[in-house]
Image (cartoon, rainbow, N blue to C red):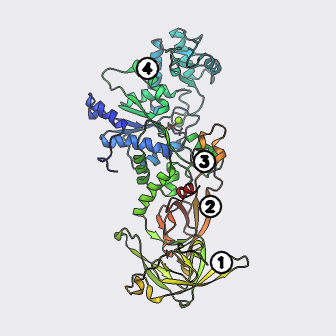
Amino acid sequence: MGEEERSLNFIEHIVEDDLTNGYGQKDLRFRFPPEPNGYLHIGHASSICLNFGLGLRYNAPVNLRFDDTNPAKEEKEYVDAIKRDVEWLGYEWDTERYASDYFQQLYDWAIELIRQGKAYVDSQSSEEMAEQKGTPTEPGKESPFRNRSVEENLELFEGMKNGDFGEGTHVLRAKIDMASSNMLMRDPIMYRILHRPHHRTNTDWCIYPMYDWTHGESDYIEQVSHSLCTLEFLPHRELYNWFLDQLVDSDRLRPKQREFARRNLSHTVVSKRKLLQLVKSGVVDSWDDPRMPTISGLRRRGYTPESIRNFADTIGIAKRENIVDVSLLEFHVREHLNKITPRVMAVLNPLKLVITNYDEGKEEWLEAENNPGDESAGSRKVPFSRELYIEQEDFREEANRKFFRLKLGGEVRLKNGYIIKAESCTKDGEGNIVEVQCTYDPKSKSGSGTEESLRKVKGTLHWVSIPHAISAEVRLYDRLFTDASPDTHKDKDFMDFVNPNSLEKITGYLEPSLKDAKVGDRFQFQRLGYFNVDIDSTAENLVFNRTVTLRDTWAKLEQKS
Ligand code: ATP
Ligand code: MG
């Protein structure tokens, strides 16, 4: 969709209103703030396209900010993967920032809050604090440590920072309102003790700031104008604002948090924690396993950045959560690959076909267009000979008139080649058809201009010449989960819905032009689907992934049932 044709989404309306009401274009600044505790998934793609899309629309900078405040779960590997994925999607960030860049500033501000009597050290256990929280309808109870003196608080907080105390012994809390109807305002924790090295600050710190204390302040430091997050943070907005109230200078821009709906994709899970569980339990091989809904998994599977951006653009930004059917994502990749991939022939379930009136030992190199929809894609030569493979399902001894493929006594055209007629077939001891004998019409060669070459027959089959074919491992993927929303069942775990048949590895036979295919190259295997060369591929052992079938086979199945 062109930028101009699309109507504004509600976030863009908010920005437009702000521009009308006093913001200058130069005030606009956005950020994408991943926590480096896993790989990015298709849900993140929505947030990336939203934030970077705003940057492009308003010519405003967008920071990539790592929200790295929990060293127990975060790693450099994840930082690197996230950067790779955002770049691959085609976006450029203005500056790379880390919440950990601000640890000292946050600490100094926390001391300021203690001095103003707005924060205190609580020395209760987490269980005790939880008991005092109250419920949404009942006010909480104040901690016995709530009224510690400023001096005592300063001393204890410094001790926490210096490593004098064990994990769980003390926390720093904001002193807000234990009776607030918003539970998050009931003296939220600002700092906890964690004796863990951090991937960037190493052992410099053993107290780490909590999300709420970090996020808005990081936005303020970076002068982010619109801090966009998912809906579960709506109740946090009051706290986001409370913290800013304590700090904001009237001459500096005050960031605002606004929320949009999390995107979920059917037949999968979009949560780093759950995706990590799939990796750790061995259900998939890695974060970039082509069955994963991660950006890196989709990339390896053969998805293009354009197809993911178009998908995100089509589903847009919503105020309410819903599940987007994965077939919509597949539609977008199909649409893009249809435009850009060269057509080739490959047979995945081979049945031998012998053309009895074609000379033994003869070969011909037939002209084949690389993309019938795009003349500039050029053409190549494919070898033809007496012995070919076709797909097993393309032949039947008998069939009704709706079967436009090959049956005994019937005719089809071999793509780029001749019209053939099936004369007889051979079966093994169990009755399986193992060979079909045909005759061909030598005057019917495609493109030769003869009357016979223009003769119309109902079916056209793809094929490969047996003596020229190269073999390759072909990996066929199916949905990772059998249920459309595996993580929404109250009585069952999402792992109960793992599809045991999500990967099938077979040997395929390919036309020889594919022998030099390089990792990442994408093709349409005619009549079968879109495939790309997997990173496991070598010159000796080619490995292809099926990115997506040519048509939506699931939609058909669902219609039937
Ligand atoms: P996860 O549960 O997968 O870890 P998260 O929200 O904790 O998700 P973050 O790394 O904190 O992950 O997310 C970075 C940004 O991406 C946040 O602004 C977050 O709101 C947004 N985001 C995460 N998941 C989705 C999703 N499914 N749809 C839209 N935006 C998302
Ligand atoms: Mg998170």
Label 3 amino acid?
Answer: Asp
Residue 152's label in the rendered image is: none
Label 4 amino acid?
Answer: Trp
In this view of the protein, which residue sits in the foreground, 12 or 541?
A: 12
In the rendered view of the protein, which quadrant contains the C terminus? bottom right
Residue located at (53% from left, 8% from top):
149
Q: CA distance from mark 1 to mark 3?
A: 36 Å
Res 287 seen here: yes
Res 89 seen here: no
Residue 452 appears at what percent x and percent y? 42, 86
Mark 2 Cα-neighbour bin, 10 Å: few <14, some 14–19, many ≥20? few
In which quarter of the view is residue 70 placed? top right
Q: CA distance from mark 1 to mark 4?
A: 76 Å
Circle 3 — which element?
loop
Mark 4 and ligand 1: say if the CB distance to the nearest ligand atom is below 8 Å. Answer: no
Q: CA distance from mark 4 to mark 2?
A: 54 Å
Mark 3 and ligand 1: say if the CB distance to the nearest ligand atom is below 8 Å. Answer: no
Tell me: residue 298, above or below residue 465. Answer: above
Tell me: residue 23, above or below residue 300. Answer: above
- Does label 2 or label 1 sit earlier along the sequence? 1
Nearest-to-viewer mark from 2 and 3: 3
Circle 2 — which element?
strand
Residue 483's label in the rendered image is: 3
Residue 448 appears at what percent x and percent y? 39, 85
Label 2 amino acid?
Answer: Glu
Label 1 amino acid?
Answer: Ile
Task: Name the residue that disc number 4 marks.
Answer: 242
Task: Name the residue that disc number 2 marks.
Answer: 504
Q: CA distance from mark 2 to mark 3?
A: 19 Å
Circle 4 — which element?
helix
Task: Name the residue that disc number 1 marks.
Answer: 433
Callout 2–callout 3 Cβ contact below 8 Å = no
